[in-house]
Image: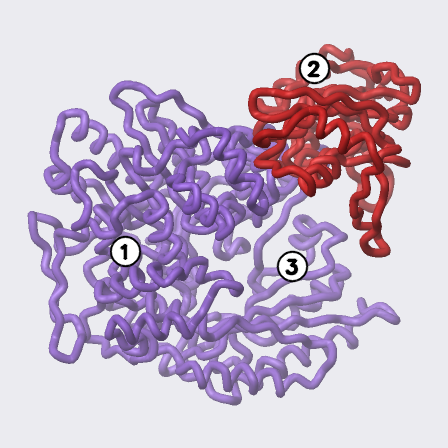
Chain colours: A red, B purple
Amino acid sequence: MLSIRVFFKKLGPLAYISHLDLNRAVLRAFQRAKLPVVYTEGFNPHPKLVFTQPLSLFQESETEIFEFKVEPDMPYDEIEKRLRGALPVALEITKVGAPVKKLSEIAFAEYVINIKSDGISADEVERLLSQKIIVIKKTKKGEEEVDISPQIKVFSVEETEEGISISATLSNSSDSYLNPQYIVDYLNRFIKIESSGITRYKLFDRDMSLFE
Amino acid sequence: MIDNALLKKMLREVDKPGRYIGGEYSEIVKKKKEGELSVAFCFPDSYEIGMSNLGIKILYGVINENEFIRCERCFAPWVDMEKQLRENNVPLFTLESKTPLAEFDVIAFSLQYELCYTNMLNMLSLAGIPFYTSERDETHPLVIAGGPSTYNPEPIADFFDIISIGEGEYSLPALFELYRKCRNNSVSKKEFLKKAYLVEGMYVPSFYKTEYNPDGTISSVIASEGAPERVTKAIVKDLDRSFYPEKPIVPYISTVHDRIMLEVFRGCIRGCRFCQAGIVYRPYREKTAEKLNCQAKECVKNTGYNEISLLSLSISDYNELPELTDKLLEWTEDEKVSLSLPSMRVDSFYKELMDKVMSVRQSGITFAPEAGSQRLRDVINKNISEEEILNACDVAFEGGKDSIKLYFMNGLPTETNEDIIAIPTLAKKIVDRYFASPHHKKGRSISITVSVSCFVPKPDTPFQWFGQHSLEELVRKQKLLSTSIESKRISHKWHEAKVSKLEAVFSRGDRRLSPAIVEAHKRGMRFDSWDEFFDFDKWKDVFSFCGIDPLFYSDRDIPFDEVLPWDHIDCGVSKEFLVREAKSALTGVTTPDCRTQCSGCGANSFGGERSCCP
């Protein structure tokens, strides 16, 4: 049995399809690629397919991962060739290979949040993000006020032609995950945001080394 | 092309933005080229419904086969997207190249049901294209339509330059190539239309004039400009050789029928007297099992779907069904592909078939007795007996099924209270049969769902002359049925009678209804087939505002000798046959299926390979 890790980009039109849709698109590509994908056992077997922390609708990413297994083994370049031929054009593969670290070791993700807004200074945003950041999170028990600042590892803000651009490294593990949309929603309470765009760029482990 | 930044902004504001992005696997994107003809193929309902339609897949594929024709898709935007389009002054655009509809040479609508007519106008309105043919000139696209509801094209005739009657995969490529040549040679629209009706199945409504009697009935329909007095539908002669979409688009978002649809045959040998599809798709034409098996393999390879649905009106009538299922099962199990059937006749449902096509996980099965009493089943020519229904249920029990759904109709011609009460009586017999069955497991129970729709008289059926019950009577019978159910194991679902009433108005309507559709559109009505938007009271206001009595169309029994609005459209089945069938219905005499004995409906004149016509 061979484990395969695929790095891909979720850009452009793919930002408008949900994680569930993406999952289904990959499963169908497996079938088209005629890969001997390993299935789960049980009453209703389905291919073993694992993704990194799903993106919300409208968010894009330069670094996404899915993993699966094949049986019998096949060369990685053959798997890559077949997958490239079977995936939708918009879903661009950047790397296919053996998993190095476990997916569960991913701890942080770097995002760029572009905000279109008139007359907003980087300093102002910097100040807003350097204090307690109280947002309302929906939980199973109802709505809850949470300070998300501990989940922001580092950030920087710069001014752009259209507004500002925030580069932020956020918690991105199954125990602690911060959806960057919370930062946009928080800022929207203080400044008028015309539009925003969120892109995930890199994934890191606990020691902040690049996850590959 | 639509501004990308603006599109992004709009998509943020809508539910299911995946409906509007295109870019799905196997989408056909062509570069614009010199001398091409561009066609915007429009489906006046949501993306999820439209992308589930086999006809759309066939036509999209076959039209794009011509390298000089660029065919793109457009679906009715949901109300939230419509709001965005209107607020941002963005015209309706196609999915492939995001081009506004008005920039296309042809706008082609697929009209599947009458209740999409307001959506159709709404799409034209969002595209900035005038509704009436008479309001459009050489600068506007050619606006055409086709699809099952155009067998009575009259309520919408004034909106279309051409209406394609019959099977478009045969006739539309020829029409488009003709238009492309005419346009490239600067032939005027009017001159082109005079050539267009020479293509099989093409109806040019502006060349026909309807005249009325003082009592509102039609006195005559007169053809001009050399157009034929009757337009005969176009059909595919040999389905094995006809285009089939072996590489259909695979949507990202889930659609209603998200699977491979393998059309096994076209037409139906049965002749149920209420059923329009059973008449207008005649003659019955089959594909060979070998061809179907190849098509299924190609589809699985090209789509990655893991379910194949065998599609046809009455699948168990297929001559080669055992061969087909055997061939399919040789490879589908290994590829983890499952088979499914949409519905089955009770008189040809057997254990082996069930084992082949239904997974053990599927706990339910659907049958369509249509009427509760034998008398009424004979009236509608269903040709099944109660014993056959009960036997089919036995087979289902043996296969471990413990939920059965039964389709019925309410308001059928000659129907009495006894016929209605016979529905729960039949359901109760099935419950009793379950508990008496050797396959009944201790501690398990059965659930029967009785799903009842309202009869709508449809053009080209033996029941086209019979008026629909009044709204009050339909509702009374629904209640009577509900209160007659005595078992907790039987549940009752019904269709909104008001929806069926509106459907009946347009089904048997004429050209005088088009102002009502325009008025309804003006009042913001759309998505009439969706419960959350359908507003019968508003429709009543529209009809009264337009001076139209809707019951003249829906409720009236029409004499056999009256001119029908669709008499000049020839669906291939003769009026004499329909009259004979209507009279047999009234006396409760059944007609055998086409294979047992030809009843001379007239469809044999079309020929057709692997047909059952003599």
Q: Are marks 2 and 1 in contact (CB under 8 Å)?
A: no
Mark 2 → mark 1, Cα distance in angstroms? 57 Å
**Which residue ends up furthest to the left in the rendered image?**
B225
Residue at 45% in and 85% down: B473
Mark 2 → mark 3, Cα distance in angstroms? 52 Å
B334 left or right of B370 in image: right
Depth check, mark 2 against mark 1: the one in front is 2
Q: What residue is disc 1 on?
A: B572
Depth check, mark 3 against mark 1: the one in front is 1
Q: Residues within 10 Å of mark 3 (few under 14, many from 20)?
A: some
Mark 3 → mark 1, Cα distance in angstroms? 34 Å
* Foreground of the two, B315 or B403: B403
Q: What residue is disc 2 on?
A: A94
Q: What residue is disc 3 on?
A: B350
Residue A182 image offset from top left, x and y in percent: 74, 39
* Foreground of the two, A77 or A156: A156
Nearer-N-terminus badge (3/1): 3
Amino acid type at mark 3 = Tyr
Q: Determine which quarter of the picture holds residue B215.
A: bottom left
Give above or below for B425 relative to B381. below
Give above or below for B448 relative to A111. below
Residue A173 image offset from top left, x and y in percent: 87, 31
Give above or below for B524 relative to B175. below
* Foreground of the two, A129 or A115: A129
